[in-house]
Image: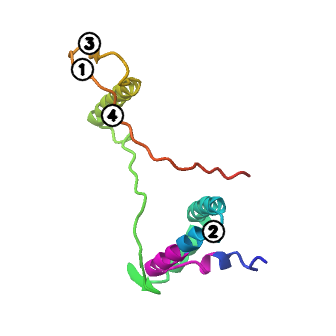
C-alpha cells in the first residue's frame, strides 16, 4: 500500500552521512544475497535520479525551500546536524553587451581554435594502430591514435 503523502517516501530515507553509509552497506548485502533483483535496483536508481533532478529543478519547490530558509536571519545555520548556507549559486555573466572589441576578437579566435581542435581530434580518433604509419604533412611528425579508455555499464532509459 502506498503512503498517503508522497513526502513519506523521502522522509524515511537516510538524512546524514553515517545513515547513508549504513544504508548502502545493508543494501549491498541484501543485493548480494539475492533479496532484490539487480535490474529492479537499476530501474529504481534511475527513477530516483530523475526524481531528484526534477524535484531540485522545480521552481515552486525551490521557492518554498527558500521561503523557509529565509526565516533564519543568519547566513549559515544548522538543522538536525545539517549545515545550511545562503549563497548565490549558478552566477553567470553575459559579456556580449560590454562593448569590448578585445573580448569580441578573442571570442572569435577561441571559437576558431575550438573548431580546429575538434577537427584535429576527430581526425586523430579515426587513426588506428593497424593503419600504415601516418605522418603530419606540415611537421613530418609520426601520428599515433589517441589512447582510448572507457567503462562498461548499462544505459537505462525510463519510458513514459
Cα separation, mark 1 vs mark 2, equals 53 Å
Magenta span main SS: helix
Marking on residue 142: 1
Q: Is residue 155 above or below residue 7?
A: above
Give the crowd class for mark 4: few <14, some 14-19, many >=20 residues within 10 Å: few
In the image, residue 87 sits, relative to residue 159, either above or below, namely below
Residue drawn at (59%, 71%) of the image: 33
- Number of other residues with Cα within 10 Å of mark 3, as a class: few under 14, some 14 to 19, many 20 or more: few
**Mark 4 to mark 3 CA distance (whole Å):** 29 Å
Identify the secondary structure beneath mark 3: loop
Q: Are marks 4 and 3 in contact (CB under 8 Å)?
A: no
Residue at screen point 42% across, 62% down: 89
Tell me, yes or no, whether the highlighted magenta stretch contains residue 133.
no
Query: CA gap, disc 1 to disc 4?
Result: 32 Å
Q: Nearer the viewer, mark 3 or mark 1?
A: 1
| Residue indicated by mark 4 | 107
Between circles 1 and 2, the one closer to the viewer is 2
97 lies left or right of 38: left
User: Of the residues under marks 2 and 3, which one precedes in the sequence?
Assistant: 2
Q: The residue tagged with tag 2: helix, strand or loop?
A: loop
Question: Which mark, by number, is residue 34?
Answer: 2
The residue that mark 3 highlights is 137
User: How many angstroms separate mark 3 from mark 1 (CA)?
Assistant: 10 Å
Relative image position of residue 34 (x, y in whole percent) = 63, 68
- Mark 2 and mark 3 residues within 8 Å of each other at the beta carbon: no
Magenta part of the protein: which range? 10-26
Amino acid at each position: 500500500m502506498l503512503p498517503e503523502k508522497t513526502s513519506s517516501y523521502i522522509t524515511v530515507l537516510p538524512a546524514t552521512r553515517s545513515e547513508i553509509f549504513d544504508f548502502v552497506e545493508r543494501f549491498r548485502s541484501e543485493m548480494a544475497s539475492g533479496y532484490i533483483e539487480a535490474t529492479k535496483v537499476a530501474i529504481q536508481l534511475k527513477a530516483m535520479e530523475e526524481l531528484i533532478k526534477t524535484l531540485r529543478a522545480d521552481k515552486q519547490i525551490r521557492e518554498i525551500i527558500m521561503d523557509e530558509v529565509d526565516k533564519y536571519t543568519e547566513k549559515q545555520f544548522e538543522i538536525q546536524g545539517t549545515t545550511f548556507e545562503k549563497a548565490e549559486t549558478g552566477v553567470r555573466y553575459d559579456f556580449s553587451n560590454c562593448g569590448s572589441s578585445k573580448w569580441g576578437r578573442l571570442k572569435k579566435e577561441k571559437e576558431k581554435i575550438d573548431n580546429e581542435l575538434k577537427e584535429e581530434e576527430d581526425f586523430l580518433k579515426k587513426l588506428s594502430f593497424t593503419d600504415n604509419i601516418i605522418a603530419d604533412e606540415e611537421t613530418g611528425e609520426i601520428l599515433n591514435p589517441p589512447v582510448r579508455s572507457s567503462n562498461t555499464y548499462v544505459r537505462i532509459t525510463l519510458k513514459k
